[in-house]
Amino acid sequence: MSALLAIAYDTLLLLCRRRLFWLNVWLSVAVVLTVASMACGPDGWSLGFGLKSWPSSYLTKGSPWETTLYFGVIRRTAQWWIVGAAPLLALFSMASVVPKTLKSGQAALLFTKSRGRAEVLLGRFLGGLLFAAIPALICVSGLFLTLGWRLGVWESKLFLAVPFALLLFAALAAVTVLLGVLTKSASASLAVTLLFAVSVLALQDAASSSSAPDDEGEFKGLVHSASGGFLALQSFAWPLPRTQELMEGMDRLIGLRSPRLFRDLMRRWRIGKLRVGAAAADVLEANANTAAEPVTPLKLGEAIMVTAGFSGLTLVAAAMLLNRRDL
Amino acid sequence: MAALKSIEFAIDLKSLTKVYPNGVQALNELSMRVRRGEIHGLLGPNGAGKSTLIKCLTGLVHPTACRGSVLGYPIGDPEVNRLLGYLPENASWPEHLSAEQVLHFAGRLHGLVSRERSRRVRELLLLTGLEAWRHDRPQHFSKGMRQRLGVAYALMGNPELVFLDEPTDGVDPVGRKEMRDLIRSLKREGKTVFVNSHLLDELELICDRMAILMRGRVVRQGSLEELTLESCRYEIAVAGNLLKDPSLLDLVQRLGGTVALAPDQRESHIELPTRRPQLVQPVIDALRQEGYLLLSVAPARQSLEDLFLEAIRSGGQFKNREPGD
């Protein structure tokens, strides 16, 4: 156990020395500062700590829209930065760890001191997870403090975004580890992992849109489900990391305001800013009211299990492959 | 550890074969035994399979077929790793750690607790003379310093069996002497040291036994005396030209010896392939009888370098050079 922790800690130190780590940290700080720089006053709202302001009759200090604005922005930040881009940046650093470990000069030092190759691989993986947790924790902590400072709301549930970010990162990191063992090349493993991530998103989008209600309120899925193609799509997507469900589940667990309110706020802002006509506003509102099928706790649990299981099985496959290789 | 004490051979290999996926046969039914507590050298030309052998013994490479054990554990059993120390030929040190941190990392891998680890790190830094550079990163070290760090890394877990792959490569003469002393001190502590080196004179100075590897097989194994036993000979220097004396020439040739004339043609050198002084006596008697002046009579044996070169030239096929024995 101590050897496993030693390898994980060493991996963390190794990754924290990379320039990308600092880029990730500073970008996380920048994201937090951008959110913190938003403020509502008596006559409207401003950005950049008052550097740029927009007059508004409804988005004012103390109005319900102020809360909606913060919650909405923080939701988007969680989705796009904490769970999206920051782990992806971490993956760029992580991709070279396993191929470097397998180079003969380093493998000879490390593998002859460990009780098994799987221990080294798992240590590297855990170190990568700790590494990915750092920018996520910085960002969430910053957002937590911002929310408390601006609205007086101390929403500790925000920290739930960190395990979700790590769960999704773990799936991609496990794929990188497997490909690292397979190819011994950082660039190849990173490129294929990114391709895998895009494919998973596209596949799950196709599978979910096939079962979503259409404009007339009928299920396209009923039609599609009759065809073998849709079933194949669903079954193919089933064991893969559940990105969308996890994102939606995170929203639910964190318990921020309904996304509808935020979209409504955005619609009002667009109308006000771009002077969109009433008809267009109706269309925007109609779109805003189109809610996706909510994620039930059971579905979320399944998504967590499937994603964690995918990471675990991928790591087991990598360890099995490594055990068969000559170093 | 109690079971370990009862083991006679640190390395006991029977028919170790390694064929790489590309079809290259690196080891061919190699058999070898290394006694516990000895310093054992490994010689062989490039491509003989030395590195593959060490990698098989340390579990880095899987043998295609093998019967045998390392410290009583089957080949490839990762459990044996806690008893092994390994200095690889081209160690690639972590870029993010100082020399001291590298050793602490090795200590953690061995499961040493903080206080014990710190004590051991201090000991090893002093032992390898790296105390003054403990905060420096190995990337800034000279080749010799990196080798010394590698030895410290290998010794971190107080191993029973230490593999040293080219330990004196890049080390200056003073450092080599220190390395030799270090290896001898390991032997005094009861550890088994397995050294792979191209520096034959180094091996000659420190090894109790050695093996010569050719095309994946051990062609010779034993102590330096055992290995050069067949090359033992007597060299007799005589004033005068013996080539003009057919009766003496005939006697020397019957004993399997040779006669060579010095370039100035004033001295002759007789070489008798024997380690028995009794077999030299008839020649000495005949020389005295003929009135030749004996300049010197001395036993001689091949150097390790000569033996190694002969092994390479003969492709591992040694001829018997002791007809009289």
Image: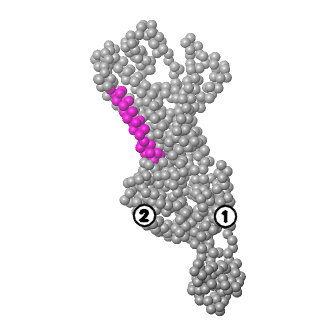
- Dot 1 lies on which element? loop
Give the residue number, with chain letter if any, for mark 1. Answer: B315
Mark 1 belongs to chain: B
Residue A319 place in picture, x, y as percent: 58, 44
Residue B34 in picture, x, y percent from top left? 60, 66
Residue drawn at x 59%, y 23% as measured from the top left: A207
Residue, far front: B264
Quarter where residue A18 is shown? top left
Residue at disc 2, secondary structure: helix
Which mark is drawn over residue A299?
Answer: none
In the image, residue A56 sits, relative to residue B108, either above or below, namely: above
Give percent across and percent down for residue A42.
Answer: 28, 17
> Secondary structure of the magenta portion, mostly?
helix
Residue found 62% across the figure and 48% down from its top: A324
B207 lies above or below A302: below
Residue on which the image places disc 2: B127
Magenta part of the chain: A8-37
Q: Specify the quadrant of the image occupied by residue A262.
A: top left
Total marks placed:
2
